[in-house]
Image (cartoon, helix red, strand yellow):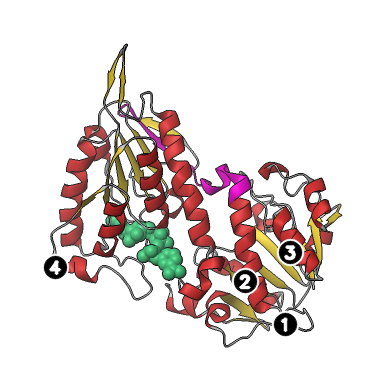
Amino acid sequence: MRIGVPKEIRASERRVALSPEVAGKLAQAGHEVRIETAAGENARIPDSAFAQAGAIIVPDACTAFGADVVLKVQRPVSVVEGGPDEIAWLHEGAGLIGLLAPFEHRDQVEAYAARGLTAFAMEFIPRITRAQSMDALSSQSTVAGYRAVIEAAHAFGRLMPLMMTAAGTVAPAKVLVLGAGVAGLQAIATARRLGGVVSAFDVRPAVKEEVQSLGARFLEVAAEEAKAAQTEGGYAREMSAAFREKQRAVIGEALKKSDIAISTALIPGKPAPRLITAEMVESMAPGSVIVDLAVASGGNCALSELDKVVEKHGVTIIGYGDMASRAPTHASAFYAKNLFNLLQLMTDKESKAFRPDWEDEIVRGALLTREGRVVSEALARGGL
Ligand SMILES: NC(=O)c1ccc[n+]([C@@H]2O[C@H](COP(=O)([O-])OP(=O)(O)OC[C@H]3O[C@@H](n4cnc5c(N)ncnc54)[C@H](O)[C@@H]3O)[C@@H](O)[C@H]2O)c1
């Protein structure tokens, strides 16, 4: 199989869809791996590391795209966006695997079908035990949750841990984490490691034990509805107006006492729930910091701005939409491993050709387009 890895050209994307480790594994398995020159530059992985692992460094994007299967981090760029037409560089019938944001860019999914591509969205890999090693949402959320706390600690003019020194005593910072999924749990763990006193809130009571086992306090909204907050897929549901009212009161009280808030709440296929209002920001002490990890999906905080750091009412609000990409070396390594594990599943053991089993639950879940048609069940349903 010829596997192509182009350089990511979207603004502020530093990751690359291959690591030297995975390049080595693919080359050893007998595949031809072509990676565009400088593709790993922003993740601090030089061409020489890929070459040593057995990959072929190609001089331009067009050559990297001309493969049987193309591995991407972000969806291809199009002429409409002012870039080159990356979709046109893909061969008809080629495989395309990436974080293709299909809910948000449905028109582009149609374009994959029109080009005859077999496209897979890493976001749609089912959250089942067998697919854990391919779960890019989890691997990237892990990095993002960690990095969110590092960004918050950096922007916070004070110290995080309890310090008793000859020059004075510092109380530990109070950290509130909203949404305790993969990113939230990693944020809790990181904030605890830095010595913060952490509380967390999630609509799914199922996460209470996990939150507590990390040494954080779990905030609860007393409501019957909470019992049904989790979908079969393990995700959160959109809650009723009455529930949201109660939730606002709990979060509002907790925020007043917090120095740092990390919000991570998402509902797949829907705008992010609005958890932090402008009034709540105003109620926080000057010098506090909010990191809104949901900013690209509309934001959990009313005052966050995508890809910006803003100061409102003396509170710093960080809205980086590229949080995982801010730790690009490990984010790329995790992501490349996810892709490798998915490719293994879709490769014929004998011929080493790209031959997915179309009935496999993981393949079916991630598949967007095939033979000129949009075939995604998640897109048809409008949710995961
Ligand atoms: N292979 C597996 O079995 C596997 C892998 C990864 C994740 N999971 C599970 O999938 C689930 C979703 O994880 P995720 O991190 O991708 O979720 P996500 O990114 O969709 O959402 C982040 C968190 O926000 C929470 N949330 C949504 N609305 C909220 C609101 N109004 N207020 C507060 N919190 C709100 C969600 O419950 C979730 O915990 C979790 O249960 C996770 O443990 C399972």
Location of residue 228 (image quadrant): bottom left
Image quadrant occupied by the N terminus:
bottom right
Tag 2 near tag 4, CB within 8 Å = no
Give percent across and percent down for residue 200. 27, 49
Nearest to viewer (mark 2 / mark 3): 3
Residue at point 69%, 63% (across, down) = 71
For marks 2 and 3 on the same chain, the one whose residue lies earlier in the sequence: 3
The answer to whether residue 317 of the structure is visible from this angle is: yes
Distance CA(mark 1)–CA(mark 4): 49 Å
Nearest to viewer (mark 1 / mark 4): 1
Distance CA(mark 2)–CA(mark 3): 13 Å
Image position of 48 with respect to 33: above or below: above
Along the viewing direction, whichever of 121 and 129 lies nearer the viewer: 129
Tag 3 near tag 1, CB within 8 Å = no
Circle 3 — which element?
A: helix
Along the viewing direction, whichever of 184 and 317 lies nearer the viewer: 184
Q: Which mark is residue 25?
A: 3
Along the viewing direction, whichever of 167 and 124 lies nearer the viewer: 167
Tag 4 near tag 3, CB within 8 Å = no
Circle 4 — which element?
A: helix
Horizontally, residue 30 falls left or right of residue 147, namely right
**Range covered by the magenta-colored residues:** 312-330
Circle 1 — which element?
A: loop
